[in-house]
């Protein structure tokens, strides 16, 4: 029942935006801006650039709102526009495939201990710190649910490159988690971390 009420409110906003009703556009912006801006920030590190991309994406949402047929989730439809706009921005600025060589992780962190002390924000910071290519593929695959085939098509890379970037992202995240675990152990023993 709650979903139907929420969907009805969205349809009301959509209809208002289709009529170019400024109040409906503002309510749509207010309802989704923080969530969709955060989505931009997952792909684009610089907050000012992410804001520019978000504004461009929101403008596209308003311009293309007639193309939303009512089938499927409206937020999902907007998320796709935001992701596509973020990827387009990254392609234009050619900063999508920066990589660093990292050796394979041979140590697995104690996830139970970390889970008790790490916040979601800490994990997002680790993801944000990944090299651009790793971060983009990781976000698309692990968070947004794209397949390697879809990622390859979106980024104009091979499926194997997508798989490789994901694998390297996972290794880098394991290393970050290992460092966080070591820092936590130092703090628990009353020492300051070496970093």
Image: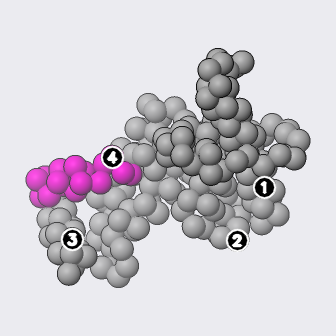
Q: Which residue is mark 1?
A: 167
Choose top left, top right, bottom left or bottom right for residue 37: top left
Q: Secondary structure at mark 3?
A: helix
Which of the pair 130/104 is nearer the observer? Answer: 104
Residue at mark 1 to residue at mark 2: CA–CA distance: 15 Å
Q: Which residue is mark 2?
A: 149
Q: Secondary structure at mark 4?
A: helix
Residue 122 vs residue 10: left or right?
right
Query: Which of marks 2 and 4 precedes in the sequence?
Result: 4
- Residue 84 in the image: x percent, y percent? 52, 57
Q: Which residue is mark 4?
A: 34
Q: Secondary structure at mark 1?
A: helix
- Residue 102 in the image: x percent, y percent? 85, 39
**Is 187 included in the stretch rendered in magenta?**
no
Residue 89 in sight from this viewpoint: no
What residue sits 78% from the left and 55% below the top? 167
């Amino acid at each position: 029942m709650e979903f139907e009420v929420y969907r009805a409110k969205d349809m009301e906003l959509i209809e208002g935006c289709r009529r170019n009703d400024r109040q409906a556009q503002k309510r749509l912006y207010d309802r989704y801006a923080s969530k969709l801006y955060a989505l931009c920030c997952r792909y684009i590190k610089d907050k000012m650039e992410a804001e520019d991309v978000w504004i461009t994406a929101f403008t596209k949402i308003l311009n293309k709102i007639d193309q939303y047929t009512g089938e499927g989730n409206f937020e999902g439809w907007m998320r796709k526009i935001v992701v596509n706009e973020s990827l387009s921005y990254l392609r234009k600025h050619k900063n999508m495939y920066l990589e660093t060589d990292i050796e394979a992780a041979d140590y697995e962190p104690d996830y139970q201990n970390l889970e008790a002390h790490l916040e979601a924000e800490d994990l997002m910071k680790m993801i944000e710190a990944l090299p651009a290519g790793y971060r983009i593929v990781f976000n698309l695959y692990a968070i947004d649910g794209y397949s390697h085939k879809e990622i390859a098509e979106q980024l104009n890379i091979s499926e194997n490159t997508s798989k490789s970037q994901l694998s390297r992202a996972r290794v880098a995240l394991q290393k970050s988690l290992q460092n966080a675990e070591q820092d936590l152990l130092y703090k628990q023993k009353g020492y300051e971390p070496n970093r």
